[in-house]
Amino acid sequence: MTESLFDANPALDCCGGLNNVDYSQMDMSVLAELWRLIDLTEPRFCVAVIAIIFNPFFWNVVARWEHRTRGLTRLFGGPYAACYSLAVLILLLNVYRSHSITVAMKAHPRWEPLDNAHVYSAGAALMALGSVFVISSFMALGVTGTFLGDYFGILMDQKVTGFPFNVMENPMYWGSTANYLGLALMNASPVGVILTAVVGLSYKVAIAYEGPFTEEIYRQRSQRCKHK
């Protein structure tokens, strides 16, 4: 007869196993309190969610349209002017996104378990770390490297591999996400944490579309160079 896992490891059979746990005895008051503080239908929360989702959707659609038609390049008289113009618009949209998230957090009450000095310090540290990743990414990539210059035909000579890209992939996106999480913790805002999760998810989707498309742009350049 085969010996069961619990027979071989009695410690795993503590309290008769998970099947004997009485989940009705769990204290759900914390979750109930948290749910009471969050109104997912509140207009300012909904505006923030829309702003978060819209931004990466907008710049990906516009950049792909530019890559296919060179419409912005013709409109602004050159790829650099077009890319810089899109960069300004993206920055303005990001400012509005940050504003809408802040407004949504202020529209909801603070959560007492997060409202202490330790959480505040952790939030400040996250914001500092996120800012390092965002700023260092911009310094490494430049304006055109940051704001989709590849889609305008402004290609980099080689892939950036120095800091912070030697630490993680897409450090600007994840640095931005860390900034929003830090802001949420500093404001003891459960709504801010939820909105940060939406930010992270929207970036995850954007990366899934941007990564392969950008790689294809450079692959096509490599093929053109080989045929010269």
Image: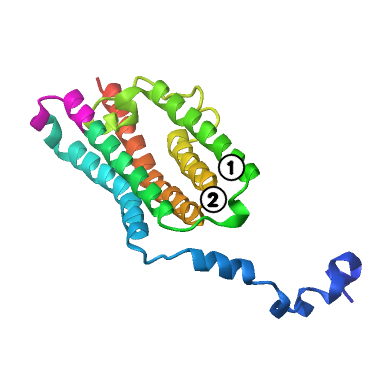
Picture layout, residue 188 above or below residue 126: below
Q: Is residue 47 left or right of residue 188?
A: left
Q: Which residues are magenta?
A: 74-85
Please, what is the dominant secondary structure of the magenta stretch? helix
Secondary element type, mark 2: loop
How far from the left and from the top, in percent, is residue 118? Answer: 65, 43
How far from the left and from the top, in percent, is residue 60? Answer: 28, 43
Residue at 21% across, 37% down: 67
- Marks 1 and 2, how far apart at CA: 8 Å
Please say whether residue 82 is one of the residues in the magenta stretch. Answer: yes
Asked whether disc 1 touches disc 2, contact meaning CB atoms under 8 Å apart, the reply is: yes
Secondary element type, mark 1: helix
How far from the left and from the top, in percent, is residue 53? Answer: 34, 52
The residue under label 2 is 188
The residue under label 1 is 120
Residue 168 seen in render: no
Q: Is residue 10 left or right of residue 64?
A: right
Q: Label 2 is placed on what type of residue?
A: Ala
Residue at 81% across, 74% down: 17
Q: Label 1 is placed on what type of residue?
A: Tyr
How crowded is the residue under tag 2: few (<14 C-alpha within 10 Å), some, or many (20+)? many
Judge by depth and name the residue closer to the eye, 169 or 184: 184
